[in-house]
């Protein structure tokens, strides 16, 4: 596509030719000949076409300009997410020094988010962006590793079911929950009913989830991003398992936020006395529908113990399966090892509106470097700390059940 400047110049040339024909006829005091009329009409068509082309070109150029302007501030975040290195940060701290370069910048950013000093290595939320591994630019230090938070989100079921993530907060978060207000029809002069709604609250407070990994000095000395990515992915998967276990477990996990199934007010129903997975799943849906309808981000989370039974069940006998394309009876169907189960006998599950589950992280996560505890083994210990909480706004948003699998 030609730019608007060249198109305008081309248009001006054609307009000049049209003006020359008109001026010639004025000087000679005559009308245009048939050849001149044909030439004039042809030039006029070109000018009209060029007018449209100029208009489109200007719009496209303005769009490109606004795109560049909009994306310019993001370049720093992209640079940070691609070049931040865990191993570089660990090596700087374990050798008695301070963080330098980009790692120091990201640590300071994490401290700003948390509004307090952070021991070890701070990881701000801007490192939550997806990125590929950059092999080309790793001549001195590993670069472009998959961030810990990326791996955490990819490994955790909690990030897929559609909870309401409040992001990073700096203090206890209180969410007001409005009860149903009373409104009704009345006569023309009847007394209005009290329509005031009662308010409840959901308070989110920090709960510490932590773990550590021992890294050999040989691994830290490697000049390649794969080892770094493997370490972070492993730590992320382990932490995601703990979050999932607390959220989707049939009972509360010690020192963790309360589970969805353990929330006060969660609905129940009488499960089938014999193996009938389809009946129980449909009854779970009906239980929610009877209570408040089928609104919101509805989904199932079932124990893996029920997978084969659900996969082989029919929603309509010999016509339509219960579980199709990751949809269970028409709703998203997920599986987890967190719900309780009895091998070869039964499995637990929940169904409900996951948008009513609120989650917050309190400050950025951090990694402390301990070069002494495992020094005799030639290892460095990394201790990861993260503070978060989650809770259900209304227990009746979910129904829990235990279904026979055999």
Image (cartoon, helix red, strand yellow):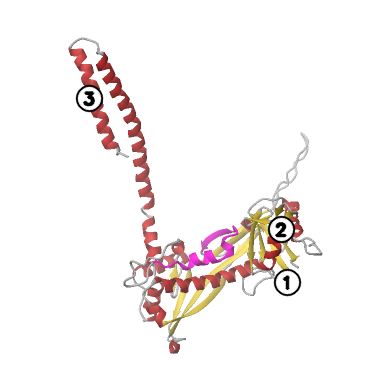
Q: Position of residue 52 (x, y in %)?
A: 35, 31
Q: Position of residue 404 (x, y in %)?
A: 76, 66
Horizontally, residue 165 falls left or right of residue 248, namely left
- In three-dimensional space, the C-alpha distance between marks 1 and 2, rounded to whole angstroms, equals 30 Å
SS class, disc 1 = loop
Residue 130 falls within the magenta-colored stretch: no
Tell me which segment is drawn in magenta: 144-169
Give the residue number, with chain letter if any, for mark 2: 396
Residue 16: image tag: 3
SS class, disc 2 = helix
- In three-dimensional space, the C-alpha distance between marks 3 and 1, rounded to whole angstroms, equals 88 Å
Q: Residue furthest bottom?
A: 376
Give the residue number, with chain letter if any, for mark 1: 344
Residue at position x 33%, y 26% from top?
48
Q: Earlier in the sequence, mark 3 or mark 1?
A: 3
> 10 Å neighbourhood of mark 3: few (<14), some, or many (≥20)?
few
């Amino acid at each position: 596509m030609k730019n608007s400047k060249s198109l305008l110049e081309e248009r001006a040339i054609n307009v000049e030719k049209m003006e020359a024909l008109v001026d010639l006829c004025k000087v000679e005091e005559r009308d245009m000949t048939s050849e001149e009329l044909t030439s004039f009409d042809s030039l006029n068509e070109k000018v009209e076409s060029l007018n449209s082309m100029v208009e489109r070109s200007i719009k496209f150029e303005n769009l490109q300009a606004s795109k560049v302007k909009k994306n310019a501030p993001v370049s720093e975040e992209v640079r940070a997410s691609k070049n931040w290195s865990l191993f570089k940060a660990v090596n700087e701290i374990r050798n008695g020094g301070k963080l330098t370069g980009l790692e120091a910048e990201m640590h300071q950013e994490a401290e700003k988010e948390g509004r307090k000093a952070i021991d070890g290595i701070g990881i701000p939320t801007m490192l939550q962006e997806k990125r590929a591994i950059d092999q080309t630019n790793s001549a001195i230090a590993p670069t472009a590793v998959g961030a810990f938070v990326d791996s955490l989100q990819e490994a955790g079921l909690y990030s897929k079911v559609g909870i309401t993530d409040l992001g990073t907060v700096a203090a206890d978060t209180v969410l007001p929950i409005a009860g149903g207000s009373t409104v009704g029809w009345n006569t023309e002069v009847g007394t209005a009913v009290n329509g005031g709604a009662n308010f409840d609250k959901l308070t989110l407070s920090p709960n510490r989830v932590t773990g550590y990994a021992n890294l050999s000095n040989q691994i830290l000395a490697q000049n390649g991003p794969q080892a770094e990515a493997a370490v972070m992915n492993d730590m992320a998967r382990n932490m995601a398992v703990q979050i999932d276990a607390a959220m989707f477990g049939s009972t509360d996990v010690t020192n963790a936020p309360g589970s969805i199934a353990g929330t006060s007010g969660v609905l129940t129903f009488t499960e089938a006395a014999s193996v009938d997975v389809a009946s129980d799943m449909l009854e779970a849906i009906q239980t929610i529908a009877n209570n408040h309808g089928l609104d919101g981000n509805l989904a199932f989370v079932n124990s893996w113990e029920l997978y084969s039974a659900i996969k082989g069940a029919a929603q309509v006998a010999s016509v339509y399966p219960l579980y199709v394309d990751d949809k269970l009876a028409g709703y998203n169907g997920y599986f987890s090892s967190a719900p309780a189960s009895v091998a070869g006998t039964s499995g637990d599950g929940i169904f409900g509106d996951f948008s009513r589950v609120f989650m917050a992280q309190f400050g950025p996560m951090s990694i402390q470097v301990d070069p002494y505890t495992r020094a005799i083994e030639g290892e460095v210990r990394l201790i990861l700390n993260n503070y978060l909480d989650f809770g259900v706004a209304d227990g009746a948003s979910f129904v829990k059940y235990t279904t026979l699998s055999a």
